[in-house]
Image (cartoon, helix red, strand yellow):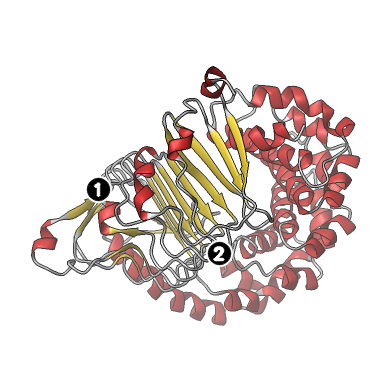
Amino acid sequence: MQKDLLCKLKCLDVVFVDELTTILSLDDFLQRFHTLKVLQIEGNNDCLPKEKAENGMEVIIRKAFKCYDLKYILRQESSSIMNNLVILHVTKCHRLINLVPSSTSFQNLKTLKISYCDGLKNVLTFSIAKTLVRLREMKIESCVMITEIVLADDDDDHDAAKDEDIAFSELKELKLLNLKSLRSFYSGSRALNFPSLERLLVDDCTNMKIFSRGELSTPVLHKVQLNMWDEACWAWKEGLNTTIEQVNLNEESFLKKRREAPPSQQFLSFAPAPNLNLQTRLEILPAMVAGVWSDDNNLQLEATTQFRKLLSNERSLPIEEVIKSGVVPRFVEFLMREDYPQIQYEAAWVLTNIAYGTSEDTKVVIDHGAVPIFVKLLASPRDNIREKAASALGNVAIDSPRFRNLVLSEEALIPLLTLLNNHANLSMKRRATRTLSNLCNGNPRPIFEQVRPALPALAQLVHSNDEQVLTDAFPGTLLSF
């Protein structure tokens, strides 16, 4: 291949025939590709797709997805690759022991997202954390072994160490979700400074008793959001450490109030306590079922909202219990309530989450006739309902080629493409693009004539400035043609 063509290369797919425990250093090879933006690396089975992207001359590991046997992202001698890394996503790498070597510098990193990595006990060492001067967003989710985000090192309790601090100077958003073993963000005595932190979400971190032992500065933070789906559910008392302590104390208070409430009203007090464990939530299930089947519109909406929240904990979705309670056909009825858009939206969200489960769970949603209704809702006058309908259809389509073909046979493609018009907001474009990707991919591929109408839209999407839209539209979807 000619050098001038290599310099213009935008996408490169590499397939490894052997399973790897380390993503090998590719910097010598990739320095030829000055314009490379997306590099997809896949193993020889469904467990090992790895995606990388490049920024200028330096390789960016953008996403490592479902790498079940991956133990190390980089070798110690390859840690310099990370210097220009801007975005790092790692998910479902259950054997991952260390995120990166302790010598790594993340001086240009802006986004860090780690989820479903069951072998990790911490995310960052103190030395790595000090380099995160440009980090703007951090999200750590559903890693069952993580006890702290920043690891306190051996020198942490020395007097000299107390003069050092960690400054996350540009961090604006921090999300800690479903971290069952998390005890603190940082257990050391060094000071933590978050001068720009505006949003902190701590949801289902039931063992977190304190944020940090050392001095803590969060000058622009005035609340801690406690439920990822409900911004109105928040707490704040005196400061961040006091707030975290108070949240855990309040759980017992909530349980007492729930026990004293009349049975028919118990589920109404469910929302203010997002940190309750799953067993406690399921105790309220009969009252929620009664609310769904009630003739009272207000009770229907409140109960449906509680089902949505029950199914919003991504790691431990009690989908089977919800299905066995017999409420799915009722939620399908609610989808048709054009006179009551609030319950349409909540019911759509519940069914979307059920369709996110196993193939059997998805089939339940299909068998109750939800798919053609969701296709119709793609033309709803309300943006949030259209977006949720697209999400539901995407969850059905990604389950299997058979279910994907079912969605296509219900003629979902054309109304879905209308959501990608120039007036669509970014959230809508992201969701519609993701669902479009699900409809155009799979093994075997869909019949070309069924998805041909998507080509003009995909040709436009590759010019998007949004990184998430580009990820879904290109290269995987476009190259499938």
Graded by Cα atoms within 10 Å as few (under 14), some (14 to 19) or many (20 or more), the crowding at tag 1 reads few
Q: Nearer the viewer, residue 30 or 138?
A: 30
Name the image quarter holding the C terminus. Answer: top right
Residue 302 place in picture, x, y as percent: 66, 60
The correct choice, above or below, for 353 with respect to 384 in the image is: below
Q: Based on the displayed image, in which of its 4 quarters is residue 69 positioned? A: bottom right
Q: Which residue is mark 1?
A: 219
Q: Based on the displayed image, in which of its 4 quarters is residue 388 positioned? A: top right
Residue kind at label 1, given as amino acid type: Pro
Residue displayed at 78% across by 51% down: 396
Name the image quarter holding the N terminus. Answer: top right
Q: Seen in the image, is 182 located left or right of residue 455?
A: left
The correct choice, above or below, for 455 with respect to 134 in the image is: above
Residue 241 place in picture, x, y as percent: 29, 64
First along the sequence among labels 2 and 1: 1
Residue 213 place in picture, x, y as percent: 23, 67
Q: Nearer the viewer, residue 424 or 293?
A: 424
Q: Residue furthest top?
A: 4
Residue displayed at 39% across by 70% down: 147
Graded by Cα atoms within 10 Å as few (under 14), some (14 to 19) or many (20 or more), the crowding at tag 2 reads some
Q: Based on the displayed image, in which of its 4 quarters is residue 183 positioned? A: bottom left
Residue displayed at 49% across by 65% down: 143
Q: Are marks 2 and 1 in contact (CB under 8 Å)?
A: no
Q: Residue furthest left?
A: 159
Q: Seen in the image, is 207 located left or right of residue 298?
A: left
Q: Which residue is mark 2?
A: 271
Residue 427 in view here: no
SS class of the residue under badge 2?
Answer: loop
Q: Nearer the viewer, residue 115 or 381?
A: 115
Q: Seen in the image, is 51 located left or right of residue 72?
A: right
Residue kind at label 2, given as amino acid type: Ala
SS class of the residue under badge 1?
Answer: loop
